[in-house]
Amino acid sequence: MNTPQRQRDTAMDKPAPGSSSACASDQSREGALSAPRRRSALPRIVASFVVLTFAGLSTSAHADWHYGTVNELGIAYDGSTVTVKVTGLQRNNCTCYAPWPDQACLDRTRASFLEEYSLLLSARRVGQTVGINIDEASCKVVAIYEVDN
């Protein structure tokens, strides 16, 4: 039953409007009833570990620059993959085109695919040094430019 006395007691438990804290007696009563909760640092440590682990994994699949002259330029057996091998690219585990694991591949989905292909043809013809940036996980070309000799 909700008596006037009970309503007054309940109203005293609530902080006054505009007040940021309850009465001191309420705080001491709450402290006596329950021990202060300590947050465990374990969830934050685990979360930090997970974030750092993923950050470490993402850096292992980064893109890196390789410089040299174009030794080989080919269109693969599938008829759609364009591969390139430059003197500065010493890889034998490329996955962009498995039959030729020592060559990087141009990405046909890039808007600049035709320009990249023509740049490689031109560089091959004149012996121009190029810099290619490849995704180290797959050896797909991410960026390419001619290097001034």
Image: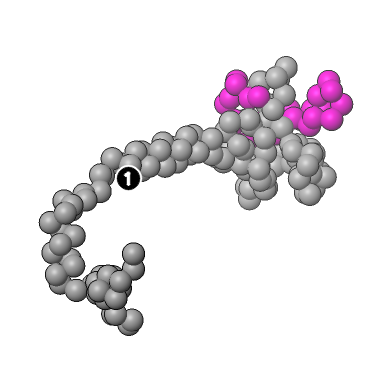
Q: In the image, residue 39 lies at what x, y percent?
A: 25, 48
**The N terminus sits in image quarter:** bottom left
- In magenta segment, residue 91: yes
Q: Nearer the viewer, residue 119 or 28?
A: 28
Q: Secondary structure at mark 1?
A: helix
Question: Is residue 101 visible to us here?
Answer: yes
Taking 111 as reference, is 8 above or below it? Answer: below
Instruction: Name which quarter of the figure residue 75 lies in.
Output: top right
Residue indicated by mark 1: 44
Q: Is residue 106 left or right of residue 8?
A: right
Q: In the image, residue 100 lies at what x, y percent?
A: 71, 20
Q: Please report the bounds of the magenta region as a residue range.
A: 68-95
**Residue visible at 32% across and 45% down in the picture:** 44
**Residue visible at 58% across and 31% down in the picture:** 137
Q: Give the residue furthest to the right.
A: 79
**Residue visible at 60% across and 37% down in the picture:** 135
Q: Is residue 23 left or right of residue 51?
A: left
Q: Nearer the viewer, residue 25 or 46?
A: 25
